[in-house]
Image (cartoon, rainbow, N blue to C red):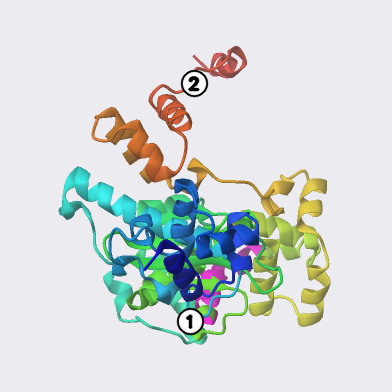
Amino acid sequence: MALGDRLRDRRERAGLTQGDAARALRLPRELVSMWETEARTPGLGQLEELARLYRVNVAYLLGEEELDEKREREVLFRGLGGSPEARLELERWLNFLDGWADLLEDLGGAEVLPGPGKPPRGLREWAQSTDARRAPTLAAKAREVYGLGSGAIPDLYAFLDEQDVLVYRAVLGSISGPGGGVSGAFYNHPELGYCLLVNSDTTLGRQAFTLAHEFAHALFHYPSRGLISWKGERDPREKFADVFAAHFLVPTKQLKDLVEDDRQSGWPDPYEALQLASYFRVSYATLLYRLFEEKIIEGDTYEWLKGYSPSQMAFYLGMDPEEFSIPEHKTLHLERYPVSVIERIKRAVEAAELTPSQAAGLLEVDIYTLQRHIKMLSNPPKADAEERLEFEELPS
């Protein structure tokens, strides 16, 4: 099969039109057509982007090897709406996971790889749960198993990293656009175990909800191997994960205790609700949902409170509006990866187990950016005079 035929075949198998592929690659549709008719030949960089979008590797497109079945992950894309750009980001994530697993095996042998993930023993009996009515109880059980108590989780990204859950940020666009959008994904990698994807084009509170939602899939739907969460998905596992996430992030007892204290200062009040959302590190919408679900507020009050802008209220309260604002759409670099990945790469480069070029290739950044980052991690920046002054104010 010629290159053009392989390109056309893989595009069609991915369910994309030439226009879809062109938009994902930010190129004219005519160029995609000329590649498939072999009127023109894509360059190496373009082949790499095409391979990522079509879920194959460059060697296959060039006819140098047969299809690598390991890269065939149709289960993660079955029925997926959303944009071709989101598909490209999803494949970028999956490619990184395979590359990371290969690197860890090279550095420490196969014994360093945990294999497919499984939940702690206290939760395994609930595998494949889809009954949303049971989700609040299982959220409380998960908090108990992980020793989280009943308060707010200080940093969900850090918590998951400590549990060896690999979290990857991706630019997936708006989740409210036409045709729906991807908020996150779960993949039980055959070598790395639990891996989660989160859409960085959402508010911090929404990212927390997505992480908790995907964590629910990891704990209870891990035999499914992979699931994508996107607007319009009607799988009962998604409703279960939504309810789990809300209760995992905002435990009932703590919420009711805090609301009882707030009632004395004129409840309900949108500013009080916003401060509760900030305390639990969730979105304003998630907090209102929990108040309504616990029957702390009635339906008409819920609708009334929904009409206020959390970012503008945060500004007038003297809080950071960015906590409740959709971030500016931007390209991610090293911010994609969890702290544990960056630290392991740093150690490997410093020990000459990995060249800077190899590390930069895996992380998809330029060598200069990576070397500068590693240098800063090895030699933390010095405090300036004003920062040192604080120490002089402390008792000697």
Contact flag, marks 2 and 1 (Cβ < 8 Å): no
Residue situated in front as seen by the camera: 207 or 270:
207
* Inter-mark Cα distance, 2 to 1: 46 Å
- Quadrant in the rendering for residue 215: bottom left
The residue located at (61%, 60%) in the rendering is: 22
Q: Give residue 104's position: percent from left, percent from top.
A: 25, 48
Place of residue 128 in the rendered image (x, y in percent of width and height, measured from the top left): 38, 83
For the N terminus, give its image quadrant: bottom left
Residue drawn where x is 67% and y is 73% of the image: 289
Q: How many marks?
A: 2
Whether residue 144 is visible to the viewer of this picture, yes or no, is yes
* Residue stretch in magenta: 239-258
From the image, tell me which residue sits under label 1: 237
Q: Say whether residue 65 is left or right of residue 218.
A: left
Q: Earlier in the sequence, mark 2 or mark 1?
A: 1
Q: Is residue 172 visible?
A: no
Numbered label attached to residue 267: none
Residue 277 at what x, y percent from top left? 66, 59
Amino acid under label 1?
A: Arg
User: Would you identify the image quadrant in which residue 393 lies?
Assistant: top right
Q: Can residue 183 be found in the magenta stretch?
A: no
* 80 in relation to 29, above or below: below
Name the mark on residue 381.
2
